[in-house]
Amino acid sequence: MGELRMERTFRASPERLFRYLTDAKSVAGWWGPEGMTVGASRLDLGRPGPWSMALSDPSGRAMEMSGTVISVDPPRGLELTMIVPGTGVESTVRLEVKPQGTGSQLTLIQSGISDEMIAWGQRGWIGPLNRLTVMADAGAAAA
């Protein structure tokens, strides 16, 4: 099994970015595949325990993402498991936050996935990370 690693730089402080990573309303706004609508969810990623997100596409096809928050270390990051939709494969996702200048750097590390799933994940995480960047940087500019 392999590992996917992606990095992003934000204008938001580590504390503000961490809030966007863990607050249920914020997570519902950025996470999930492009074009999907978030429905009933348990998305408080700020404490250990189960999480889930019901998603539907424009045609009404539904799927669920779920897993368990393993650890939370404000504002440095969190670690969770995720059942990869459509595969039944459980992977581990670490979101590491570090200060960078007046902003922060996010490193996303998804492990326990095949090379094929790494390629899929690289495409799959782009939309959510783009939405997170817009949200967190807009919040930083308003602060």
Image (cartoon, rainbow, N blue to C red):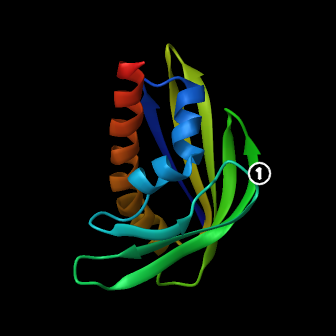
Residue at 33% x, 37% y is: 134
Residue at 23% x, 76% y is: 58
Q: Is residue 11 above or below residue 62?
A: above
In the drawing, does residue 18 fall left or right of residue 57?
right
- Residue 26 or 123: which is nearer the viewer? 26
Secondary structure of the residue carrying numbered label 1? strand
Name the quadrant of the N terminus.
Answer: bottom right
Name the quadrant of the C terminus.
Answer: top left
Q: Position of residue 140 (x, y in %)?
A: 41, 23
Q: Position of residue 41 (x, y in %)?
A: 53, 67
Q: Is residue 80 visible?
A: yes
Q: Residue furthest left?
A: 59
In the drawing, does residue 35 fall left or right of residue 117?
left
Q: Is residue 121 above or below residue 87?
A: above
Q: Which residue is mark 1?
A: 71
Q: How many marks?
A: 1
Residue at 54% x, 29% y is: 16
Q: Position of residue 66 (x, y in %)?
A: 59, 72
Residue 59's image quarter?
bottom left
Q: Amino acid at mark 1?
A: Ser
Q: Position of residue 50 (x, y in %)?
A: 70, 67
- Residue 56 or 96: which is nearer the viewer? 56
Q: Is residue 84 visible?
A: no
